[in-house]
Image (cartoon, rainbow, N blue to C red):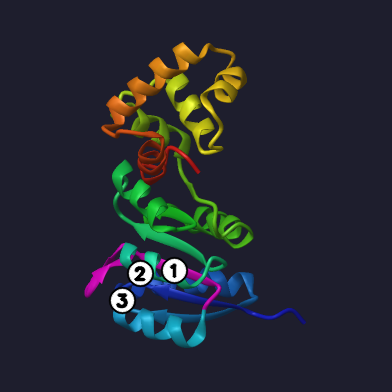
Amino acid sequence: MSELIITLIVDDHAVVRDGIRRALELRTGFSILAAASKSEAMAQIATLKPQLIFLDINLPDGNGLELVTWVRSISTRTAIIVLSMHAEDEYVLAAMRAGASAYVNKSEPLPVLLNFMDHALSAPQSFSAHDMAQIIDRDSKAFGLSQREIQILSQLHDGDSLKVLSLRLFITESTLKKHLTSIYRKLEVKNRVQAIAKARAAGLLK
């Protein structure tokens, strides 16, 4: 018999906790616990080390994303699903940067939530949300970056020389330097290291 998945549902609304609990009980294979606050959740997480956490972004004693960051600092294997009524890009990206595995709007039907849960359990360090590609695209446009500049940014993390990068991108070193100057200006950074760090923080790079 396989071990039960220790699951913690963190939400200050009993109707949300009960709805998720009932859905999981229909699936079986879960040992389900609940918490109504950030402090209560931290105590249970420290003691029970759940493999799966459903987490409201707004808690009565703190921001749920702070809890995501804390959990991720002690475990890379925990599947963390952030629940929220906010549909704005900034909330989705903030959850991704904090280390969540998925972001699901509370208005979504339970089958959708369970699909995100299955993906999160199989790949807890990945991130999924509805229309994620469009969200990332909108975020990149906020900096005014072109698709070519995004492509160049994605190659910078390898730490290769400008000569190697230019050959890989099929452009001259001079053209690459012009692109990099434009990227640094748009991101308001001074060098490659800062550009990579800011792009990752913005969710533009994995």
As helix, strand or loop, the secondary structure at mark 3 comes to helix
Eyeballing the image, is 91 above or below 8?
above
Residue sitting at x 53%, y 31%: 155
Amino acid bearing label 2? Leu
Amino acid bearing label 1? Ser
Magenta stretch, residue numbers: 50-64
Query: Residue 67's mark?
Result: 2
Membership of 152 in magenta stretch: no
Eyeballing the image, is 29 above or below 85?
below
Please name the residue that numbered disc 1 is placed on: 73
Front disc: 3 or 2? 2
- Which of pointers 2 and 1 lies earlier in the amino acid sequence? 2
Spatial CA span between label 2 and label 1: 10 Å
- Which of pointers 1 and 3 lies earlier in the amino acid sequence? 3
- Dividing the picture into quadrants, the one containing residue 195 is top left
Spatial CA span between label 1 and label 3: 16 Å
Q: Give residue 14's position: percent from left, percent from top.
A: 34, 76
Callouts 3 and 2 close, C-beta under 8 Å: yes
Residue sitting at x 59%, y 24%: 164
Residue in front for this viewpoint, 198 or 131? 198
How many C-alpha atoms fall within 10 Å of the one at disc 3: few (<14), some, or many (≥20)? many
Query: Residue 38's mark?
Result: 3
Residue sitting at x 30%, y 81%: 39
